[in-house]
Amino acid sequence: RWNIPTARYAEFDDPEAAVAYVRDQGAPIVVKADGLAAGKGVTVARSVEAAETAIREAMVSRVFGDAGKRVIIEECLEGEEASILAFSDGNTVIPMPSSQDHKPVFDGDQGPNTGGMGAYSPAPVVTPELATEIEERILKPCIAGMAAEGAPYTGILYAGLMVTQDGPKVVEFNVRFGDPETQVVLPRMVSDIVPVFLACCEGNLGETPIEYQIGPCVTVVMASGGYPKAYEKGKEIAGITDAESDPDVMVFHAGTKRDGDRLLTNGGRVLNVTARGATLVETIDRAYAAVQKIHFDGAHYRTDIGRKALARLNG
């Protein structure tokens, strides 16, 4: 649509038809629940059997509820992922700095996908030249296409991308901020965000200056033990005040709740421990130093957030 580059795909309402398609196409292949599934509705199947299991879990067992009554089966794009968030007033689109999420639950991108275990910004895979290409081939055509169809889009556009040998391709669009990408993009924003939102609403985004700091930002997600599968709630959390004693550290709450004077876990992804710094190495170290100060029973987090960016920067 609108000549925006993306993967080849097919949609299915019938699980048996979806299974037959997968057997014909072979693996690797991607199975997506068509509805919202808390960031966990995508399976990158490395075998036909894994794809069939994902189809039946979504469409027959309904592990995602109604979100899985229809599935999309896509070509598996090879490359490196990146996320681009953008402001839009319906005609003008202005991208924010690039970021990269870490979906799999374990180090080295192993294990099942999650809603996101950490992120960093900027993403070195998105060079200035690539950023221009993304804006011209993906973001602008999307906003222009919606306006041409009589449905101009105002708000936040989230483009989940795969940077392939053939250039950037869209994996998904969302009409919201990304989580955890927002936790590394907005802390870099120097400008007041309220005038930017107003400009989106009033149609004068192109006249609104938006400034970001140069230094990187890293966030590490602290999750409940067992996530993204079954996990327990109600574990007492300690150490956040100590972690935030560093002025360049912010702890964003996700799955937490108050119980009197106590702070308890109340979800799969519990906290986003975010740090800013002058260099990526410094920022990663600062984020993990803060993580070490926070404790709750069964806490799990990846220990390699940002390492892929370091490897790319170091050649």
Image (cartoon, rainbow, N blue to C red):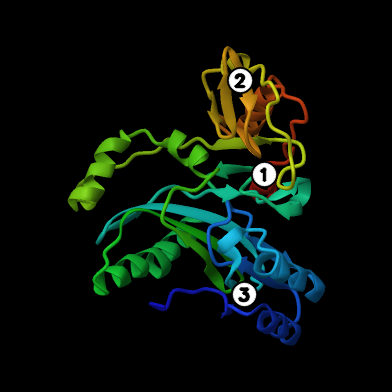
In the drawing, what numbered circle is on residue 263?
2
Q: Where on the picture, by quarter, is residue 21?
A: bottom right
Q: Residue furthest toward the bottom? A: 24
Q: Are marks 3 and 1 in contact (CB under 8 Å)?
A: no
Q: CA distance from mark 3 to mark 2?
A: 42 Å
Q: Residue at x 40, y 36 (%)?
A: 189
Q: Where on the picture, by quarter, is residue 54?
A: bottom right
Nearest the eye: 176 or 69: 69
**Residue beneath label 3, please?**
74
Relative side of 89 to 313, left or right: left
Relative side of 174 to 313, left or right: left
**Residue beneath label 1, please?**
310
| Residue at disc 2, secondary structure | strand
Q: Is residue 6 above or below residue 96?
A: below
Measured from the top left, where is residue 61 in percent x and y?
70, 64
Q: Are marks 3 and 2 in contact (CB under 8 Å)?
A: no
| Residue at disc 3, secondary structure | strand
Measured from the top left, where is residue 112 in percent x and y?
74, 54
Q: CA distance from mark 2 to mark 1?
A: 34 Å
User: How many C-alpha atoms fall within 10 Å of the one at disc 3: few (<14), some, or many (≥20)?
Assistant: many
Of the two numbered discs 2 and 1 in the rendering, the one whose residue sits closer to the viewer: 2
Q: Residue at x 67, y 68 (%)?
A: 78
